[in-house]
Amino acid sequence: MQSIPHYVGGQSVHATGVSPVYNPATGEVTAQVPVPDIAFIDEVVTRAREAARSWGVSTLSVRTNILFTFRQLLVEHADELAQLITNEHGKTLADAHGELARGLENVEYACGLTEHLKGGFSSQVADGVDVYSLREPVGVVAAITPFNFPAMVPLWMSANALATGNVVILKPSERDPSTAVRLGELLTEAGLPDGVFNVLHGDASTVNALLEHDGIDAISFVGSTPVARHVYQTGIAHGKRVQALGGAKNHMVVLPDADLDIAADAAVNAGYGAAGERCMAISVVVTVGDIADPLIEKITERIDRLTVGPGSDPSSDFGPVITKEHRDRIINYVQTAPADGITVVRDGTSLVDNPGFFVGPCLLDGVHPGAKSYDDEIFGPVLGIARVDTYAEAVTLINANPYGNGTAIFTRDGNAARLFSREVTVGMIGINVPIPVPVSSYSFGGWKNSLFGHAHIYGPEGFGFYTRAKVITSRWPQPSESQIDLGFPKTR
Ligand code: NAD
């Protein structure tokens, strides 16, 4: 059985694999991934700190050139990377290409590092005194990533952390760890010095060791809310800078004036794409007024045309979910929904006889707070309909939800859309856009239980998170200006 190597110091480091990696479309174990002991983790961190000394003072042009070459290599190897993602994650090849394209955007943003790292300069703030600011790398960054975007989320973090002069230790999800290793190899091929980007596999024990390790300066985490909260609290308690992005329950409001065909398309695309395993997936459609029945009819027409199958089959609209346990959990939400007064309009749970981890599209009508299928992040192809009478009730529902990652409104009323964008307590908002993932020149982040720590990820806030500011106040006095003055420095 193939064991997936760590990637440390610019080389594959083989170790015995213990945690199984599946092909979710067949249910077969395809590889094992190692879980390192503390001695190996120590060694990786020590070597990362050594690499940080020279990378942290590398010139901006060296870093830019490497990132440009890396970008080109990602383009050239896109088919191979997409195949790796599909094999271990299960998403369709088209969707894997989509995540690569969004990851690539972040490399392109990072290529502009000379612009993004510019400091400020103020001349003559006091007589003969100038002030300037600069940003220095934080040091060694642990990047801890979830299973659902094995390329994009590592690229969100790594591109910006490397551009700002940091060394990265990436701990990818143990469910689909191969893409991370290939990214490491491509970075080495692009000219990145050995040891500046490392892949350390493992599970919760590896994460916990990194959170407590003195040699780690900053933690970028993306994953589920309970783990994000734990990562944030533990990392902060150990004196680290932490950004921890968590789970989501994203609502899409449809106002009575909306084009129902466009709204139905959006709900199906954003609800069932990638089998609902996206943190920006729409999981609740909030219908305002009396449009629920006609909208459900349009959604079911579309659902009934969807094909569920292996991600490598071009006719599949979406593939399997990540594990058998996750599939069973999703099925349980659907089967227990009627006990909460919810109607199962479409039940896709009958694919269980397949050895792959498939769940077909499910549609629940009448989801509401207090019902498990509404309160929990299901992270599967399950869309809920919540019926409300007024716009105000829709906003109240969203703002009462403990998550605040993304939300969307569908309407032809610009004023209502603008009001909505101001009133909801959510970090990313779409107006007639169901999955409002910001482009790489903005930053990505939710509110409430969807983000612990203040810094959103990538873009300008990413550059801020991975750097420490210095402000230098300078004066070049003439010898004749010598004087003793014990007063506090003044500018006037
Ligand atoms: P997860 O929280 O189970 O795992 C994420 C990472 O944490 C993995 O590397 C895993 O090895 C590690 N981990 C797991 N349990 C741990 C523990 N108890 N202690 C320490 N480390 C632990 O998440 P997942 O199932 O891989 O990913 C899906 C989740 O990620 C969903 O909740 C989804 O909404 C969320 N997500 C959020 C965003 C975002 O930007 N907010 C993006 C993608 C995914």
Image (spheres, helix red, strand yellow):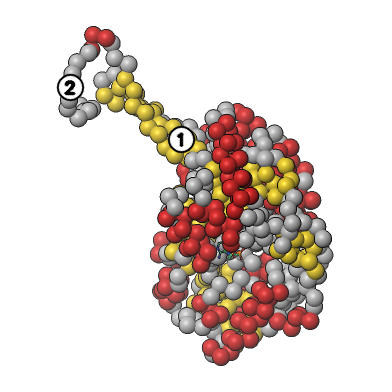
Residue name at image x 51 percent, y 61 percent: 228
Residue on which the image places disc 2: 485
Q: How many marks?
A: 2
Badge 2 crowding class, 10 Å Cα cut-off, few under 14, some 14 to 19, many 20 or more, is few
Left or right: 306 in relation to 417: right
Q: Quadrant of ligand 1?
A: bottom right
Check whether the beta carbons of the residues at disc 2 and disc 1 lie within 8 A of each other: no
Instruction: Tell which circle, 2 or 1, labels the residue nearer the N-terminal end.
Output: 1
Quarter of the figure that contains the N terminus: bottom right
Q: Is residue 125 left or right of residue 404?
A: left
Q: Residue at x 65, y 31 (%)?
A: 65
Which callout, 2 or 1, points to the residue nearer the camera?
A: 2
Q: Which mark is residue 135?
A: 1
The x, y position of residue 159, in whole percent, is 60, 43
Q: Position of residue 239 (x, y in %)?
A: 43, 50
Hey, what amino acid is under mark 1?
Arg
Residue 436 horizontal/vertical position (percent)? 56, 59
Q: Residue furthest front?
A: 39
Crowding at mark 1 (Cα within 10 Å: few <14, some 14-19, many 20+): some
